[in-house]
Image (tube, rainbow, N blue to C red):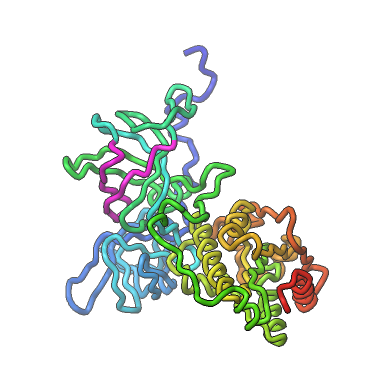
Amino acid sequence: MPWHKGQPFLEILETVYIGSDRNLIDLRFPVQYVLRPDLSFRGYCGQVASGVLRKGDEITVLPSMKTSRVMSIATYDGELDYAFPPMAVTVTLEDDIDVSRGDMLVHPANVPTVARGFEAMVVWMSEMEMDVNRPYFIKQTSQSGKLRIGGVRYKVDVNTLKRADPGPLSLNEIGRVAFTATRPIFYDAYQRNRLTGSFILIDEATNSTVAAGMIIDRAPSGQIPVNIARNQNRVSLLHKRESLISHAERVDRMGQEPATVWLTGLVGSGKTAVAYALEEKLFKLGATSVVLDGENIRLGVSRDLDFSSAGRAEHLRRVAEISRLLNGSGIIAICGFVSPAAATREQVSEIIGKDKFIEIHVDAPVEWCEERDASGLYAKGRSREVKNVAGVDSPYEAPKDPALVLRMNEIDVDEAADKVLALMRDRGILR
């Protein structure tokens, strides 16, 4: 082949760099089997999919979210101090918690996406055409269950690699497909983790493998992962209940107009400190307000959500709905959330009501925020231990026309709260 100027194919195979093939950052240990030889021993067998598992490590069990520590890592040849991919080991925990096949052990600060819905690039391997109206079995790591096809976003022309019109996939066709599983699965993007990002589909009638897929991490550019505006089709059968107390009666009793103060800014910019300072000032004035703090919401209402783009969007949707209910009862809601996407904040304002939504940009340089960050989130984002950190590996879209800009590297928290209070007075929220 005189036209070929590169290395011989065999030489490429022998010299290609494969050191980065194994992900040693994100601990993923899918449990394949629970070993109970007697009542005194309970071990969890499986292959380390990624990351490093060490004796004494704190771990979280998915999906129960229970935590414990690694007591031992056992093999046929004896105990180990640590294990890494692709080692097959048996792990014992300090606490007797319920773990079964299909569960996954991870580090508490670094969890995969836990969701029922996801999208993937799929290769169809069956002579029977894809049927979007029937369920299939999914096998992903040691998990298995049923799912339905939400739709084919587009096909890929294998000759030009360009997108083609969507439609059910046939033999050897490739396409981007949306799925909804009957129960949450734990996954990473295939690009980040081949084992937790891949799956196969099985025909429940013939038990044959019909497709293989690679899970996609992000939605297409310009499209937020979850439309957090309320789905009117889904709620068309429901009817809104009206309170017997009028808006005017609430204003007269409480001496305030309901509103949602939405503080948006980078992690470490001071949003939470300003929110609680504002709440204290309102309390001393006799006003009724509630702070919706991101961490507190995550500990309760959004405990089941992960930190993926879709999980964060759903997290904000829930906060918006809570704020709307609080405003409906005449209460002022104070929300401090990064909420980096302008489109997401726009949908939040639609849920709450644009007349009650006050967007305030808590602004500060990312370097200043990182210096003040006590959580270590920026450092974890730069080391890729945590992904989608605004200002590190994910963009922050500053509000174009906020009601107020607080430059926190130039003023203190008390002064910032006073500025918000003055804005609320100007808008007639406080009587």
Work out which residue is located at the far right of the displayed protein and give it: 410
Work out which residue is located at the far top of the displayed protein and give it: 2
Q: Nearer the viewer, residue 357 or 275?
A: 357
- At x 79%, y 71%, the residue is 426
Task: Check the picture and name the quadrant holding the C terminus.
Answer: bottom right
Q: Is residue 20 left or right of residue 32?
A: right
The image quarter containing residue 269 is bottom right
Q: Would residue 401 be visible to someone looking at this image? A: yes
Image spot of residue 279 (x, y percent): 67, 80
Say if 363 sits above or below 291 in the image. Answer: above
Q: Is residue 121 left or right of residue 278?
A: left
Is 338 part of what is drawn in magenta? no
Q: Is residue 378 left or right of residue 137?
A: right
Q: Nearer the viewer, residue 234 or 385?
A: 234
Image spot of residue 106 (x, y percent): 42, 64
Magenta: main secondary structure: strand
Image spot of residue 120 (x, y percent): 41, 43
Q: Would residue 383 be visible to someone looking at this image? A: no
> What is the count of numbered marks?
0
- At x 55%, y 49%, the residue is 224
Image spot of residue 137 (x, y percent): 26, 48
- At x 30%, y 49%, the residue is 147
Chain part drawn in magenta: 131-153
Is 140 part of what is drawn in magenta? yes
